[in-house]
């Protein structure tokens, strides 16, 4: 029989796992945990869960492990992250992206060789959560710090983790030039359409009409222009090797996102320059909606304007004559 284990202590009651379960086997319990969150609980009979992992993939808080019908563990916590509980709000997908980056580097066997650069923004404490050597950069300056680290230690894997205020606003020039120089680094860009840490101000990626604390009547594109599509902007440069956009708003998209992040790090591990993955992410607190409404908003409002997929990749090498198609 399949099995899921829900870690009560870390559950923030966001309810993303409830929506993710294809068999509707998870619900809110009546209990609050030690931190005051209403925790979720398994409501099915033991044999109903097949251990499909979708609940665990949706969880931003490393709160769920799963086993399949043969008793094999299908989802376990990655060694790419520390065991520290994050400070993120319930349903914030920073936690999901942290986990995916940790899983990828762990699966590629690169944990011991990796240096991360944390930004200023909600993920300012990322150095507490990633199990790699980490730098903290000044706001927007992560690509410069990463450039120095990679050039000084070419055999390491260096990545930056940056929000849209950090990367596309104050750090807009930094990222453009790091990409154009072809720095052999990987950039993980969290696009949650807002400045999260400072109270929900408008970001360069805020959607037309989106209400924020500095655009209370909705973003007016007559005054502020259209949201910046950073992937497409960087893809116009000749140098970068790999540019992709994924989303962490639900489990299915997170599985695809993981492939993109893996490819990005593989390019760096194989010596190719500059790989970049943008992640459409949620900020339920500053958007003023529930975690699951936030996920729906990514799908309904953001994904049309910010299309998902591989935006730029190296040309495939031609197959040698006589090789099988
Ligand atoms: C030089 C400088 N300017 C401004 C700030 C204030 N500040 C801190 S975080 C932030 C924006 C964070 O938004 P984002 O990068 O989108 O990340 P999020 O918090 O949404 O994850 C700003 C403007 C700062 N810390 N330093």
Image: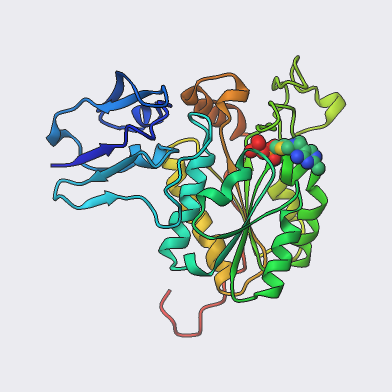
Residue 232 to residue 13: above or below: below
Give me the residue at 23% from left, 51% from top.
73
Residue 252 to residue 34: above or below: below
In the rendering, at what x and y percent does residue 120 appear?
A: 69, 44
In the rendering, at what x and y percent does residue 51 appear?
A: 24, 43
In the rendering, at what x and y percent does residue 177 appear?
A: 80, 59
Residue 309, can we see it?
no
Give me the residue at 50% from left, 20% from top.
290
For the C terminus, give its image quadrant: bottom left
For the N terminus, give its image quadrant: top left
Considering every residue shown, the one lying at the far right of the view is 223
Residue 145 to residue 169: above or below: below
Q: Nearer the viewer, residue 145 or 276?
A: 145
Q: Tell me, what colour scheme is on the image?
A: rainbow
Q: Quadrant of ligand 1?
A: top right
* Residue 114 position by quadrant: bottom right
The mark total stands at: 0
In the rendering, at what x and y percent does residue 77 appear?
A: 36, 50
Residue 281, can we see it?
yes
Q: Nearer the viewer, residue 298 or 106?
A: 106
Give me the residue at 57% from left, 48% from top.
126
Q: Nearer the viewer, residue 66 or 225?
A: 66
Residue 119 to residue 281: above or below: below
């Amino acid at each position: 029989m399949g099995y899921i284990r829900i870690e009560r202590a870390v559950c923030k009651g966001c309810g993303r796992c409830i929506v993710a379960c294809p068999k509707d086997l998870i619900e809110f319990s009546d209990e609050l945990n030690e931190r005051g969150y209403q925790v979720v609980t398994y409501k099915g009979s033991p044999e109903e869960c097949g251990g499909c992992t979708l609940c665990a993939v949706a969880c931003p808080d490393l709160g769920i492990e799963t086993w399949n019908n043969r008793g094999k563990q299908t989802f376990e916590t990655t060694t790419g992250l520390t065991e520290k509980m994050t400070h993120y709000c319930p349903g914030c997908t920073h936690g999901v992206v942290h986990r995916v980056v940790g899983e990828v580097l762990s699966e590629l066997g690169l944990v011991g060789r990796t240096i991360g650069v944390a930004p200023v923004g909600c993920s300012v404490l990322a150095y507490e959560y990633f199990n790699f050597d980490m730098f903290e950069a000044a706001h927007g300056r992560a690509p410069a710090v990463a450039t120095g680290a990679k050039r000084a230690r070419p055999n390491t894997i260096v990545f930056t983790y940056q929000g849209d205020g950090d990367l596309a606003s104050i750090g807009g020039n930094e990222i453009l030039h790091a990409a154009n120089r072809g720095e052999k680094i990987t950039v993980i860009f969290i696009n949650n359409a807002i400045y999260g840490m400072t109270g929900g101000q408008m970001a360069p990626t805020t959607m037309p009409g989106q209400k924020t604390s500095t655009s209370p009547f909705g973003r007016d594109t007559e005054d502020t222009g259209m949201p910046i599509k950073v992937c497409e902007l960087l893809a116009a440069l000749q140098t970068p090797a790999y540019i992709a956009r994924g989303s962490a708003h639900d489990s299915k998209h997170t599985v695809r996102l993981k492939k993109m992040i893996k490819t990005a790090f593989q390019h760096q591990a194989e010596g190719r320059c500059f790989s970049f993955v943008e992640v459409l992410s949620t900020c339920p607190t500053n958007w003023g909606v529930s975690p699951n409404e936030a996920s729906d908003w990514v799908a309904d409002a953001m994904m049309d304007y910010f299309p998902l997929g591989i935006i730029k990749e190296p040309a495939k090498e031609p197959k040698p004559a006589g090789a099988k198609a």
